[in-house]
Image: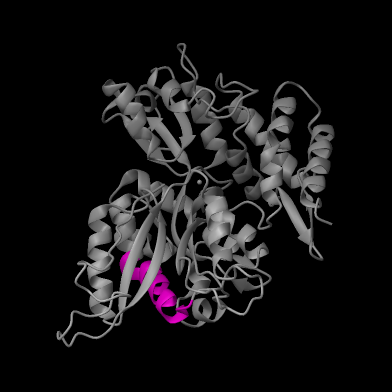
């Protein structure tokens, strides 16, 4: 698809309750806006600067930023969204007992919308924040029935990490820009006991990009009902390209990229390319310091040289609980964090992709992040339905990929996987 944040509460016990004023100071009362951000999403230095700037520009507000762990966050967010309506009446009597702004994974937003726990921010996003310019992989999962609940903050996605020295040795002078050129280059690299590429058989996020490039999808929606779509001609073409690329290496056909972790395989020195987020390069070099300075990055190639290939976009959106007792303050925080100034600063600080393609120049100086930003402009997310979590829980896409890669008939296996996806998506009907 990773994160840290500072909490500024009342700075002394001598302050009045509710982060009010020091007696006799004449300073205006400040309302506290509680913000939940995920561990390692932002550096301490970034948080310090943002908090200081925000509070100077909003003398009536004070930030209480609390860091959350990703493990178990789904249940914690759900509990927080209900905290303002403990009696279930919907009258708002319990509002204010939970956070006012929450960072959530972009693909998690549909689940929280389905719980009716989020504030509709359509008016703000369309009229004030340039919502039509957001990266689609962040914006689309934050939207339900043309209403925007999740506001894009930052993105990350896969690129091709490659060995510059092996490319040079094979006479490849520039990274490939088309799928056809990528296959040809990988075949040239697949020599002298090396793998031209290490691609696990069940790396379904990478497969999804090839399917989208062909005009297909993992699932489609019609009349409010979702169904699987792996059996379409377009999706089958995406799987066929995956099969051809995967065959140019020795990746395990019955495992995903974490079994074994592909960083360790790449560090072994016998692999020319992997598909991963740029940050994985650091883990590779840590395991094999001899590769320092030898790793390069390029966007996943597309069908033509006109644009990079589609990729799965991970990242975070910011949401506002429906039961917040300070909508104005919460909206001000979201506007500041996702606006051009601080979205750009966050991208520079943390090597993320900014939430709008036009801001990508802010990270143009970093080879890995620049490659990531180029791909993000054509990124997508998983189907925007809360039931998609049920698909991933017992993922039929992985089984489908393994069966095709071990000689199964693609059309037959695609129909089976499609039926299983449809069943998972319609469990609530």
Residue at the (50%, 46%) spot, across then down: 1
Query: How far from the left and from the top, in percent, is residue 405?
Result: 70, 25
Colour scheme of this structure image? one colour
Reply above or below: 63 against 392. below
Residue at the (65%, 68%) spot, across then down: 116
Q: Is residue 335 magenta?
A: yes
Residue at the (33%, 60%) spot, across then down: 361
Residue at the (66%, 58%) spot, across then down: 384
Location of the C terminus (image quadrant): bottom right
Q: Is residue 403 magenta?
A: no
- Left/right placement of residue 177 relative to residue 53 reads right
Residue farthest to the top, as pictured: 193
Query: How far from the left and from the top, in percent, is residue 80?
Result: 53, 61
Main secondary structure along the magenta-highlighted residues = helix
Query: How far from the left and from the top, in percent, is residue 82?
Result: 59, 65
Which quarter of the figure has residue 390?
A: top right
Residue farthest to the left, as pictured: 25
Give whichever of 60, 250 is nearer the camera: 60
Q: How many marks?
A: 0
Give whichever of 76, 397 is nearer the camera: 76
Q: The magenta stretch spans which residues?
A: 325-342
- Left/right placement of residue 54 relative to residue 106 reads left
Reply above or below: 397 against 95. above
Residue 380 appears anywhere in the view: no
Give whichever of 106, 214 is nearer the camera: 106
Query: How far from the left and from the top, in percent, is residue 257?
Result: 54, 29
Which quarter of the figure has residue 81?
A: bottom right
């Amino acid at each position: 698809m990773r994160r840290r944040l500072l909490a500024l509460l009342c700075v002394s016990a001598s302050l009045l309750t509710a982060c009010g004023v020091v007696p006799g100071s004449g300073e205006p009362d400040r309302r506290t806006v509680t913000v939940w951000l995920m561990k390692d999403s932002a550096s301490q230095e970034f948080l310090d600067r943002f908090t200081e700037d925000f509070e100077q520009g909003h003398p009536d507000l004070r930030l209480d930023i609390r860091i959350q762990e990703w493990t178990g966050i789904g249940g914690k967010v759900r509990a927080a969204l209900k905290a303002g309506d403990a009696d279930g009446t919907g009258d708002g009597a319990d509002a204010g007992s939970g956070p006012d702004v929450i960072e959530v994974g972009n693909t998690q937003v549909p689940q929280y919308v389905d719980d009716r726990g989020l504030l509709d921010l359509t008016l703000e996003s369309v009229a004030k924040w340039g919502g039509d310019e957001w990266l689609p992989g962040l914006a689309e999962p934050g939207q339900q029935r043309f209403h925007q609940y999740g506001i894009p903050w930052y993105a990350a996605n896969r690129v091709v990490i490659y060995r510059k020295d092996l490319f040079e040795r094979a006479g490849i002078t520039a990274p490939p820009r088309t799928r056809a050129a990528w296959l040809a280059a990988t075949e040239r690299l697949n020599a002298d006991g090396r793998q031209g590429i290490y691609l696990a058989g069940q790396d379904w996020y990478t497969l999804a990009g090839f399917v989208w490039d062909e005009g297909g999808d993992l699932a489609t929606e019609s009349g409010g009902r979702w169904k699987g779509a792996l059996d379409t001609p377009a999706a089958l073409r995406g799987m066929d390209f995956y099969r051809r690329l995967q065959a140019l290496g020795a990746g395990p056909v019955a495992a995903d990229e974490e079994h074994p972790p592909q960083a360790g395989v790449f560090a072994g020195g016998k692999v020319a390319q992997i598909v991963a987020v740029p940050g994985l390069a650091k883990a590779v070099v840590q395991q094999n310091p001899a590769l320092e300075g030898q790793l390069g990055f390029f966007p996943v190639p597309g069908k033509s040289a006109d644009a990079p290939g589609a990729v799965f976009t991970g990242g975070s959106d910011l949401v506002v609980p429906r039961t917040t007792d300070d909508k104005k303050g919460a909206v001000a925080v979201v506007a500041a964090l996702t606006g051009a100034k601080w979205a750009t600063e966050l991208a520079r600080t943390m090597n993320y992709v900014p939430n709008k393609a036009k801001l990508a120049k802010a990270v143009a100086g970093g080879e890995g992040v620049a490659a990531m930003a180029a791909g993000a402009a054509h990124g997508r997310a998983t189907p925007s339905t809360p039931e998609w979590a049920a698909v991933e829980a017992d993922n039929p896409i992985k089984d489908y990929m393994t069966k095709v890669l071990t000689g199964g008939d693609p059309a037959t296996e695609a129909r089976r996987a499609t039926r299983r996806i449809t069943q998972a998506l319609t469990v609530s009907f």
